[in-house]
Amino acid sequence: MKSIFGPVNSRRFGSSLGIDLSPALKQCNFDCLYCELAPSATTDKQANVVEVATIINELREHLNDKIDVITITANGEPTLYPYLDELIDALNKIKNSTQTLILTNSATLVDEKVFNSLLKLDQVKLSLDAVTDNVFKRIDRPHVGIKIEEIVKKAIEFSHIYKGKLFIEILFVHGLNDTKEEIEKLNEVLLKMDVTRVDLGTIDRPPAYPVVGLSYKELHDASLLFDASLPIHIASRVHAEPNNRAYDDEEILNTLDKRPQTIEDINLLFDEESKKRFQKLLSESKIVTKKVGNLEFFILHANEQRKRAK
C-alpha cells in the first residue's frame, strides 16, 4: 500500500498531496464516533511503520510546483509515527515553496518531542471537538490515560509559540458537542488561543458509528454562539475548484481508499479519461456507493465489507 495519495482538492487547503503514515491499517489513539474509517481498538504507538526513506522516495515522484501543500495524515493519528521529526526535517529539505501541513487530533501535544516537531511545519490543524471530560470521552473515545484538560493546556501553549498558520477544527455531532453549554466552554478555550482560523464542520462522510451531523442551518446557528472576535469559518464543499488531473486505476482506488468521494468530488478531481476509468471500476464493483444523508459517496468495495464485518 502506497503512502502518497492525491493530489486532491482540499476544501480548505488547496491542492494537497497527502502522506498517509499508516497506509496498511488504522492506528489511532482515538476511536471517534464520526471517523470515516472502521471502528478499531485505540493504541498509543504504531506497530506497523513505514520507513522515512520510502515515503520521501514516493513523494519525489509526485511533488511538483502545482501542489500547494504536502499534507501529513494517516489511517489514524499521524503523530503516533515514531520518525515524525526525521520525516519533517526531510520534507523541509525538498519541499521548495510548497507548504507542509499536519492534520492531528491534538492529543500528543502533551509529548514534548511531538510538540517541538510540529513547530517546524508551515501549517498545523488541531482537532478540538470538545473540552469537557464527559463530552470528549463520548465523542472521541480516547485511549486510556488521555486527559482533555492536559490537551487543552498544551494546545493553548502551542498556539502562542507556533509561528506558522494554526487551524482549529471542531466537528459537530448531533446531540453530543452541539449543546449551548459545550460551545460556551469551547469558546472560552478558543479566546485564549492565537489561531489563523477555526473551522466548524460536521459529519459529511460515512461514519464508523451510527451518529448524524448537523444541518447547515444548525451549523450556522452554532457558529453564532462563538465570540465575534474569533475567525470562525463554516467548512463547505461549495467553493472547491476543479483539479481535473489524470489518475490511473491504482491511483483512483488509492484515493478512494484514503477518503470517500462524492460525484462532485470526482468531477473536481479527475480528467475525462480518469472519469471513464472510474466508471469502469464502478461497473466492476471494485468501487461501491454509500449513502449518508442526502449525499452519496464512492468507497472501495473492500472498505464497505470491512465496515460490515465490524
Image: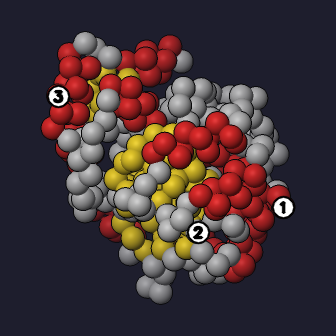
Q: Tell me the tag on residue 122.
A: 2
Mark 1 and mark 3 lie on one chain; the one further toward the N terminus is 1
Q: Which residue is mark 1?
A: 112
Q: Reading the chain from its start, which is encountered first: label 2 or label 1?
A: 1
Q: Is residue 258 left or right of residue 1?
A: left
Q: Which one is in front, 249 or 138?
A: 249
Asked if one can make out residue 105 in the rendered structure from this viewpoint, the answer is yes
**Residue projecting furthest to the bottom:** 229
- Circle 1 packing at 10 Å, graded few (<14), some (14-19), many (20+), is few
Q: Percent position (x, y) of residue 23? A: 57, 32
Q: Is mark 1 in CB contact (under 8 Å) with mark 3? A: no
Left or right? Give the position of 310 relative to 119.
left
Look at 37% across and 59% down and name the residue there. Answer: 66
Closer to the camera: disc 1 or disc 3? 3
Residue 53 in picture, x, y percent from top left: 68, 40
* Front residue (pair 106, 270): 270
Q: How crowded is the residue under tag 2: few (<14 C-alpha within 10 Å), some, or many (20+)?
A: some
Disc 2 on helix, strand or loop?
loop
Which image quadrant: the C terminus? top right
Compared with residue 92, is residue 297 higher up or lower down, i.e. above or below? Answer: above
Identify the amino acid type marked 3.
Answer: Lys
The disc placed on residue 276 is 3
